């Protein structure tokens, strides 16, 4: 994922001779209401517009709600008018890049020392990055090229961070060996370089003499044990989920709810759709848990909400793709509360029926996703269902087609049914296929709701875990689409600077 730590920021204010500061706390555990102290900013005296320098490094998790609390404390009580506006705290955040570039390079060697009694050498290379304390850490090993003194190794990719920890001038040591079956590989020689030198690409600067120090000491006429040449070098940035979000990509959230008769009569307490005045049912809880995390990535908070498997008024026709708000032209609901309201209303007007068909709602979202494949939008469909799917072949076909589009599907299974088909759709163990075509990427995540039922009835705890598990795969699925299409994020807009305030980039 990305570097996110426990969250916090602090601020100190001072007015006249008074001094103040912010204390920051973060919610360490999703399931807890308690905050843990994280830190405090430095004190800045005699200003109404402090710009704090101290930074806080926090791990970021897309799938969790991460609460921060900022406490403002004065060393002397402030006098003033009750209810008067006391100013605002401005936070700016940036992801620690820690050098996210990936370098691809290829090497060959010439006239390496012959090490094998029968035949030539079987050379391979080992790359090491140097550490601050002068030691070396292995970071890459090439394949073995058999029986040659002039090997050409395959190109390989390596994160720049792994090669030099982001320091372009740090020494990179390369050792060349002759492979032996028993593991006692013979040392041919070594050379040193740096990322900055390698980045010059193929040139006279990137032809290296392989030297064996022991041979050099013993033989006066020793020149080298061969040469290694860089054949090619290229570098590309590895973008993260947050790069795209900061560049303006919107996550569009759609929910589809199962209205089949197997859920039970909504007016009876045994029904999965039962409207208990004191507690949300399983459908509402799953919707709220996932929706409350994902809604923050959608700027207008207007979400299409669909139902499937019901008979609709006035003529009782069965639909597998009907708007919960009853408006075929505009199925959008305002926020998660708007979806819950439309869900409750539709339970009063439609008749639960069947069968359980997923393909229509998957294809519904796919139509929207197909219209915007430029990386500006990504679609997430949440299907909440009680059971056994009726249109498995059609749904597989829809998912295989959807895997080519900017979309992901979350399935939450409620009730006690067997969910074997859902596990198959998930595709974690065996990639889903339809008519002999494998899905281009894994876009489905399934979880059974019963795994998150808390015996004590503390639904906040179990719902937080549910959201964490179903959403954890979304950033990787998102990145896999963007990479497969060669889509790079737009540059982030400049940070917000309030009027009359000079911006010195403060991070959390």
Image (tube, grey):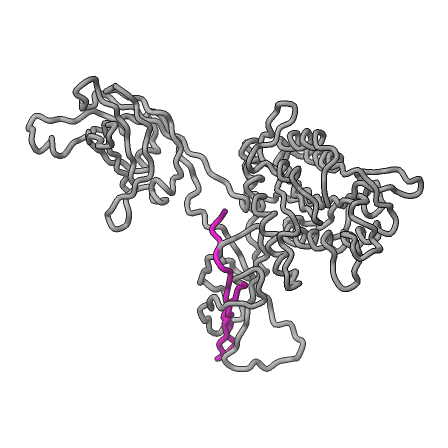
In the visual, does 72 lie left or right of 456? Answer: left
In the visual, does 88 lie left or right of 188? Answer: right
| Residue in view at x 49 percent, y 70 percent | 12
| Residue in view at x 84 percent, y 45 percent | 352
| Residue in view at x 45 percent, y 60 percent | 55
Residue span colored magenta = 1-27
Res. 506 visible in picture: no
| Residue 431 among magenta residues | no
In this view, the residue farthest toward the top is 119
Q: Position of residue 356 (x, y in %)?
A: 76, 38
Q: Position of residue 201 (x, y in %)?
A: 34, 29
Question: Which is more toward the observer, 336 or 361?
Answer: 361
Q: Position of residue 395 (x, y in %)?
A: 70, 33
For residue 220, above or below residue 296: above
Res. 141 visible in picture: yes
Question: Which is more toward the observer, 94 or 130?
Answer: 130
């Amino acid at each position: 994922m990305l570097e996110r730590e426990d969250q916090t920021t602090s601020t100190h204010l001072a007015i006249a001779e008074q001094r103040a500061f912010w204390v920051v706390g973060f919610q360490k555990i999703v399931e807890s209401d308690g905050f843990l102290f994280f830190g405090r900013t430095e004190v800045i005296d005699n200003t109404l517009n402090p710009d704090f320098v101290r930074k806080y490094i926090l791990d970021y998790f897309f799938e969790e709600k991460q609460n921060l609390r900022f406490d403002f404390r004065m060393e002397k009580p402030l006098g003033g008018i009750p209810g008067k506006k006391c100013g605002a705290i401005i936070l700016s955040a940036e992801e620690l890049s820690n050098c996210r570039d990936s370098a691809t390079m290829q090497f060959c060697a010439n006239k390496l020392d012959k090490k094998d009694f029968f035949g030539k050498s079987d050379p391979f290379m080992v790359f090491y990055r140097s550490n601050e304390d002068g030691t070396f850490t292995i970071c890459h090993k090439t394949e073995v090229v058999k029986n040659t003194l002039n090997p050409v190794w395959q190109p390989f990719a390596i994160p720049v961070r792994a090669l030099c920890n982001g320091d372009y001038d740090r020494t990179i040591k390369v050792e060349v060996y002759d492979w032996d079956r028993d593991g006692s590989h013979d040392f041919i020689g070594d050379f040193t370089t740096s990322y900055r030198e390698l980045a010059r690409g193929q040139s006279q600067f990137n032809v290296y003499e392989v030297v064996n120090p022991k041979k050099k000491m013993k033989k006066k006429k020793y020149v080298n044990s061969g040469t290694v040449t860089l054949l090619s070098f290229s570098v590309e940035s590895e973008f993260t989920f947050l790069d795209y979000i900061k560049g303006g990509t919107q996550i569009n959230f759609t929910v589809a709810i199962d209205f089949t008769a197997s859920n039970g009569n909504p007016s009876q307490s045994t029904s999965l759709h039962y409207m208990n005045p004191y507690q949300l049912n399983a459908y509402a809880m799953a919707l709220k848990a996932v929706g409350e995390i994902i809604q923050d990535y959608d700027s207008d908070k207007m979400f299409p909400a669909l139902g499937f498997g019901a008979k609709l008024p006035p003529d009782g026709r069965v639909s597998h793709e009907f708007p919960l708000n009853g408006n075929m032209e505009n199925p959008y609901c305002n926020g998660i509360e708007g979806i819950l309201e439309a869900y409750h209303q539709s339970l009063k007007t439609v008749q639960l029926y069947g069968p359980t068909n997923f393909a229509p709602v998957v294809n519904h979202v796919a139509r929207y996703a197909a219209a915007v494949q430029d990386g500006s939008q990504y679609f997430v469909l949440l299907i909440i269902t009680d059971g056994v799917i009726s249109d498995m072949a059609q749904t597989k076909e829809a998912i295989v087609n959807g895997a080519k589009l900017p979309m992901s599907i979350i399935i939450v299974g409620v009730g006690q049914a067997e969910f074997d088909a859902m596990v198959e759709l998930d595709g974690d163990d065996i990639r889903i296929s339809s008519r002999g075509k494998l899905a281009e990427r894994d876009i489905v995540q399934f979880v059974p709701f019963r795994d998150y039922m808390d015996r004590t009835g503390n639904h906040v705890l179990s719902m937080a875990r549910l959201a964490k598990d179903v959403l954890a795969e979304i950033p990787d699925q998102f990145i896999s689409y963007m990479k497969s299409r060669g889509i790079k994020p737009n540059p982030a807009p400049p940070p917000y600077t309030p009027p009359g305030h000079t911006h010195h980039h403060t991070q959390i």
